Image (tube, rainbow, N blue to C red):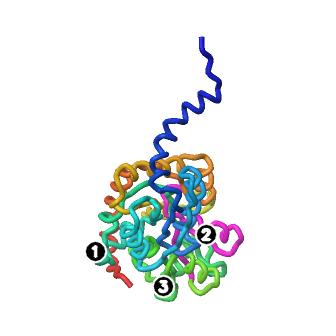
Amino acid sequence: MTFISRRALLAVAGLGTAAWLNPVRAQIAGKPVTLIVSSAAGGTTDISARMLAEPLGKILQTSVIVDNRAGANGNIAGQMVARGPIDGSSLLVQYSGYQCITPLIQPAAGFDPAINLKPLGHLIDAPQLLVVRANFPVDNFADFIKYVKANPGKVNYASSGNGSLQHVTTELLKDLTKTFMVHIPYRGTGPALNDLLAGTVDFTITTPPPLLPHIRAGKLKALMVTGRNRLAALPGIPTATEMGVPLVASSWFAVYGPTGMSADLQNRLSLAIKQVVESDSFKKRAEDQGAKAVVMSSAELAALEANERKMWARIVKVANIKAD
């Protein structure tokens, strides 16, 4: 009888994944992989890219660089990747608002993210939080709505840009509560958050990751969650539905490549991204950020995108949202 050591068995077991990934390593050929981020530093898109970069680099055995290219509601970053190299060295970390809503309000000449970008893998899903500046004169969502109704047009809110999910979600809130608030668009969540912390604007609705440190430090007050359930990180904050407002909206963040990449390379990159998102460390980091790691196939991600475009098209029309 021949005996095989445990180490040898583990090596054999790992051959499947190693053999699957070796061609993608060869195709990237040691070149750095750049994750083009469609938003400014400090927002959830940026955070999710940085959560992905290091472990992805270890799997692909190359360096992975994060490059923030904010502007034009995600079209700048999207077009860079769509028109960039097709060898896997330039990938897009994208936010659902830019992927699904931007094409509805700001179609770019010769570019449609649903056509020119190939979904590679889902990263995280996150509901949104309504937060107000620390000195805003209310401490709960019910009083917030009362205050806004008593001061029409005097309360303003920040978003990461016209047509962003923050913008569209807040316009939906206005429609549902019959309130009037003034929109102030920024080039990304980071700049919007800076002005909120400085007290220049009154509130914003965005995903938890960039907000939680400031909430815990008492620099912002969280009033409402747009998810179906309360956040484990903030169990005392009610959902909009609990407060009688049927508002459910979440953001998701995913990785795309140019459609000109070979199907084989797309599949192999998808496997590498899947390995990262399935890891315990990635799941834990997402949970700590008030988000959830979600694995999806390319086909599942494409279907999610198509469904959300249809859903948000109605709100864009009702609110008459236009590009900058």
Q: Secondary structure at mark 1?
A: loop
Closer to the camera in the image, 71 or 21: 21
Residue 232 can be seen in this image: no
Within 10 Å of disc 1 (Cα), the crowding (few <14, some 14-19, many 20+) is few
State the CA–CA distance, disc 2 to disc 1: 36 Å
User: In the picture provided, is 179 more to the left or to the right than 9?
Assistant: left
- Picture residue at 59% right of the left edge, 65% below the top: 209
Mark 2 belongs to which amino acid?
Answer: Leu
Within 10 Å of disc 2 (Cα), the crowding (few <14, some 14-19, many 20+) is many
- Picture residue at 54% right of the left edge, 81% below the top: 147
Q: What segment is highlighted magenta in the picture?
A: 202-229
* Vertical relation: 201 (above or below) 173: below
Residue that mark 1 sits on: 110
* Vertical relation: 268 (above or below) 322: above
User: In the picture provided, is 96 more to the left or to the right than 217?
Assistant: left
Within 10 Å of disc 3 (Cα), the crowding (few <14, some 14-19, many 20+) is some
Q: Secondary structure at mark 2?
A: loop
Quadrant (top left/top right/bottom left/bottom right) for the N terminus: top right
Which mark is in front, 2 or 1?
A: 1
Mark 1 belongs to which amino acid?
Answer: Gly
Closer to the camera in the image, 177 or 274: 274
Mark 3 belongs to which amino acid?
Answer: Ile
Q: Secondary structure at mark 3?
A: strand
- Picture residue at 32% right of the left edge, 64% below the top: 114
Closer to the camera in the image, 84 or 124: 84
Q: Earlier in the sequence, mark 2 or mark 1?
A: 1
State yes or no: discs 3 and 1 in contact (Cβ < 8 Å). Answer: no
Residue that mark 2 sits on: 211
